[in-house]
């Protein structure tokens, strides 16, 4: 098999590859696949073939830095295009160079949207249907993969970069891009209509609390309160649905941790972007092709307790790791933060109970609830509202137990009664309920004093 066949197969005819100047089409249910002919498909195929033959084994050289490879590819690409006999305008040359470069160095037709800072999510539903999310809304774009095989090669390139695999025996995989963007891929036979790829992008520069205030996710009062809670080593759970912005909020809360603390982050796919000096990053590992070698989040949480952490930050608990996380919070590792999928603060605590039972330890429900109520200080509920915005909709203190029930009290809640503007965007924000957290005295003992005005009823 030739080098060209091993890398990328470019069809003689194919649809245009997306580029930043394209206009996105609004999402339409069951929209038919668009078939169009790329007038430069033959030229691109010839350029691609000649480029691969010119560089040869350099594309596989593990000792070659990525920046050097990029430079050699682009230089060779320009020489090859200049040698083409087909008359091309300057704009056409630039387009062909960019698209072929994206195929070899990037992720093919997805690359323009991965570079677009306005795109927050890229969704591939089979090789012919690509959608993106902008400003919380989904649009179909005029880009496509040439074939199912083309899409599969792109998926293999992404997951192979971090040593993971996806095949018929293991058709589901979580991965990440070099910038930390989260990737999920599903291939046949699980995916009935062709391989599916979902990429949740992360900003090159992590969002700060100033950014979240500008987005309306929280306000300055709440940012000050959460900063005090993190600095005061309160144990915090961020709860919310898929795509509600939990990881972004977790990243912002983590930025409040002092620079002199030893922080251990534990994730399925490394996404957190902490800039403190003393950060140790751990990532779970799936089993190999023989079904061995799996290292679960729970294993990493247990191991982190032997690494002398000041803070343990878990990207998400979804199984028996909840028991180890609660025990860590209850045994001197205050200030830990994690996320959980749940629709309300009360549901998040119920989910923790269920996940503790998944650990295989026979514990009475009362004992589990005692663990939860003594370990968790604060639950932050995040939601993606109907206008597409991601907001913190409530901040709840876990007070303790009354009988067999965990008692909660709302500290801040979202004001839905403020209505919407002419564009349908919610005008409300977080307002104080007038209730003061019980742990304010503990914060004061640590020199963190919050003003009484922060908790005046209705205060924003």
Image: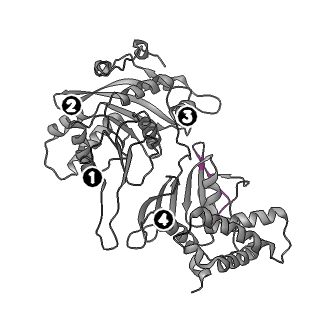
Q: Which residues are magenta?
A: 133-143
In the rendered structure, find residue 211 and report the number of the disc placed on it: 3
Return the x and y of residue 329 as percentages of the image width and height.
Answer: 25, 38
Q: Are marks 2 and 1 in contact (CB under 8 Å)?
A: no
Figure quadrant of the N terminus: bottom right
Dot 2 or dot 1: first in sequence order is 1
Query: Could you tell me which secondary element the residue under label 2 belongs to?
Result: strand
**CA–CA distance in space, label 3 to label 2:** 37 Å
Q: Secondary structure at mark 1?
A: helix
Q: Residues within 10 Å of mark 1 (few under 14, many from 20)?
A: many
Q: CA distance from mark 2 to mark 1?
A: 27 Å
Q: Between residues 86 and 319, which one lies in front from this camera angle?
A: 86
Q: Earlier in the sequence, mark 3 or mark 1?
A: 3
Q: CA distance from mark 3 to mark 1?
A: 33 Å
Residue that mark 2 sits on = 405
Residue 147 vertical position relative to residue 66 in the rendered view, above or below: below
> Mark 3 vs mark 2: which is more N-terminal?
3
The residue located at (32%, 19%) in the rendering is 440
Residue 336 lies in magenta, yes or no?
no
| Mark 4 closeness class: few <14, some 14–19, many ≥20 residues within 10 Å | few
Q: Where, by quadrant of the figure, is residue 42 drawn?
A: bottom right
Quickly name the residue at label 1.
298
């Amino acid at each position: 098999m030739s080098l060209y066949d091993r890398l990328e197969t470019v069809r003689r005819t194919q649809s245009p590859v997306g580029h930043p100047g394209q206009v996105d089409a609004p999402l339409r249910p069951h929209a038919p696949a668009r078939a169009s002919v790329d007038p430069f498909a033959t030229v691109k195929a010839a350029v691609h073939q000649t480029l691969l033959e010119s560089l040869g084994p350099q594309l596989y050289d593990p000792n070659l830095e990525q920046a050097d490879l990029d430079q050699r590819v682009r230089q060779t690409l320009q020489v090859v295009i200049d040698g083409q006999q087909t008359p091309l305008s300057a704009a056409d040359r630039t387009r062909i160079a960019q698209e072929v470069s994206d195929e070899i160095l990037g992720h093919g037709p997805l690359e323009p949207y991965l570079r677009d800072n306005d795109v927050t999510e890229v969704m591939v539903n089979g090789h012919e249907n690509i959608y993106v999310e902008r400003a919380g809304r989904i649009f179909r774009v005029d880009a496509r993969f040439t074939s199912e095989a083309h899409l599969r090669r792109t998926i293999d390139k992404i997951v192979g970069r971090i040593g993971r695999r996806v095949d018929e025996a293991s058709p589901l995989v979580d991965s990440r891009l070099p910038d930390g963007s989260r990737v999920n891929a599903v291939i046949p036979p699980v995916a009935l209509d062709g391989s599916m790829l979902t990429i949740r992008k992360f900003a090159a520069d992590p969002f700060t609390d100033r950014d979240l205030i500008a987005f309306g996710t929280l306000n300055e009062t709440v940012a000050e309160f959460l900063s005090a809670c993190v600095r005061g080593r309160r144990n915090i759970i961020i709860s919310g649905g898929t795509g509600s912005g939990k990881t972004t909020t977790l990243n912002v809360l983590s930025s409040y941790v002092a620079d002199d603390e030893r922080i251990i982050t534990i994730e399925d796919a490394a996404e957190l972007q902490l800039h403190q000096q003393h950060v140790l990053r751990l990532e779970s590992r799936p089993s190999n092709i023989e079904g061995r070698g799996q290292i679960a989040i729970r294993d990493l949480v247990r191991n982190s307790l032997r690494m002398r952490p000041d803070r343990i930050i878990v990207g998400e608990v979804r199984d028996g790791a909840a028991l180890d996380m609660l025990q860590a919070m209850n045994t001197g590792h205050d200030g830990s933060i994690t996320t959980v999928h749940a629709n309300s603060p009360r549901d998040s605590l119920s989910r923790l109970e269920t996940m503790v039972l998944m650990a295989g330890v026979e514990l009475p429900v009362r004992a589990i609830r005692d663990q939860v109520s003594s370990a968790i200080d604060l639950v932050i509920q995040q939601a993606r509202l109907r206008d597409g915005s991601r907001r913190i909709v409530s901040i709840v203190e876990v007070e303790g137990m009354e009988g067999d029930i965990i008692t909660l009290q709302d500290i801040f809640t979202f004001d839905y009664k403020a209505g919407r503007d002419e564009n349908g965007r919610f005008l409300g924000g977080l307002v104080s309920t007038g209730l003061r957290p019980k742990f304010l005295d503990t914060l004061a003992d640590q020199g963190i004093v919050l003003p009484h005005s922060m908790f005046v009823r209705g205060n924003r």
